[in-house]
Image: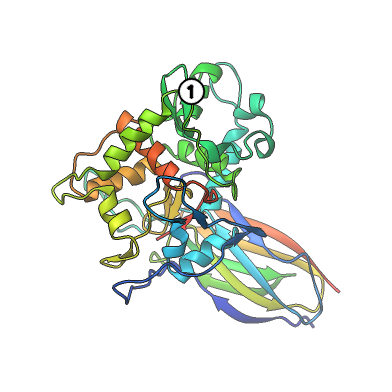
Amino acid sequence: MKRLSVLLLVSVASISGLAVMAYADPVDDTLTIDDREMIIRAKAPKGHPFDEVLSGWLFRESETRATEADSFANPGMLAVERGEELWNTVDGSMGKSCSSCHNDASATMKDVGAHFPKWDAKARKPVNIEMKINDCRTERMGAEPYKFDAEEQVALTTYIKHQSLGTPVQIDLSEGEMQSWWEKGKELYYTRTGQLDFSCASCHEKSMGKFIRADHLSQGQVNGFPTYRFNTAGMVSLHNRFRGCIRDTRAEMPKAFSDELMALEVYVTWRGTGLSVETPAVRQ
Amino acid sequence: MAAQPKPRIKVPKEAKAGEVVSIKTLISHEMESGQRKDKDGKVIPRKIINKFACEFNGTPVFSCDIDPAISANPYFEFSAKLTESGTFKFTWIDDDGAIYTDEQKITVN
């Protein structure tokens, strides 16, 4: 007779823990995903307000950290799989998919996501992966551009950035006018805004490591975007997160991919120079 | 996650007889609780996976009923002790009657 016994069952978990301390240092831990060690602490680039840049992973609860460390349990990997489907799906009047030109993403998109945003000489502004995808869709595929935060846009961006998992973030500020966009982004980062009169720096620089209610404030790094959040049980794009933060200061929100938010993306990405791309990261 | 629910399974390919093996399952599903309202104030109808079951060579290993409080993309992890090679069969049942299944073979030495 067959003998079979169920020993243990661990059920669905998305329980958010409550913070008990008013101040807590980031944990001293290492993050390994699929046998690859992530760089979650890096020496800050010259001119950076911190000595060391720290991944947001270090500021999260142990259950959240464990979910990201296990690429099977990480629900963000569903978006990666969905993105892979889209990569190979023909769309638009020219009968092409992403893979028609770019072939196998694991080769052609490897490390690409770690170096965005990039200067676009034609558009004369920095572009990110979402914009690059839409550019391909309209110019080369004869397809409609994705609307901001369309499920397809987020999934495809996640898939492309995931091909750089582990690669250190490094953007090129010497191209075109990137430096002046960086300056503009820096200005925005330190500008107080909204009814609460907060700048990005109020939370992510001056109060980094402290608690804002139950939320442990990190450096606000963007190396894990698009990120899976338990909060919404879904993927959150970078510009969605920017807008969410700005909304929370009770200010007017700039449009996604507007010049303001692109400048901010350039500057904030630079602030995370040297950290591994963690897409899809898992956060609270 | 509006796309068609897609199961993911992680079972070791091989195990020793009597060894406790860990089985991990996850399925993409929005798990709409039926308690939310849309922009017009209308209730968004409930659509969840209400049952999950796993059997091994026809013998039940684990099953459960699922209620609306379970979050999106339900994840189950459980263990089994095996004495023979065979196939795990996994079944998820949706509120709309759809059944999603997947199978995974394991060799027991």
Say if B44 sits above or below A83 in the image.
Answer: below
Q: How is the image coloured?
A: rainbow
Q: Position of residue A118 (x, y in %)?
A: 48, 30
Badge 1: residue crowd in 10 Å (few <14, some 14–19, many ≥20): some
| Residue bearing mark 1 | A135
Any part of residue B38 in sight: no
Which quadrant holds the C terminus of chain A? bottom left
Pick the residue in front: A11 or B66. Answer: A11
Pick the residue in front: A144 or A204. Answer: A204
The residue under the point 61% across, 40% down is A111
Residue type highlighted by circle 1: Asp
User: Circle 1 — which element?
Assistant: helix
Q: Position of residue A26 (x, y in %)?
A: 42, 67
Pick the residue in front: A149 or A218. Answer: A218
Say if A138 sits above or below B65 in the image.
Answer: above
Residue situated furthest left in the rendering: A195
Say if B56 sits above or below A275 in the image.
Answer: below
Q: Position of residue A211 (x, y in %)?
A: 29, 66
Which quadrant holds the N terminus of chain A? bottom right
Any part of residue A229 in sight: yes
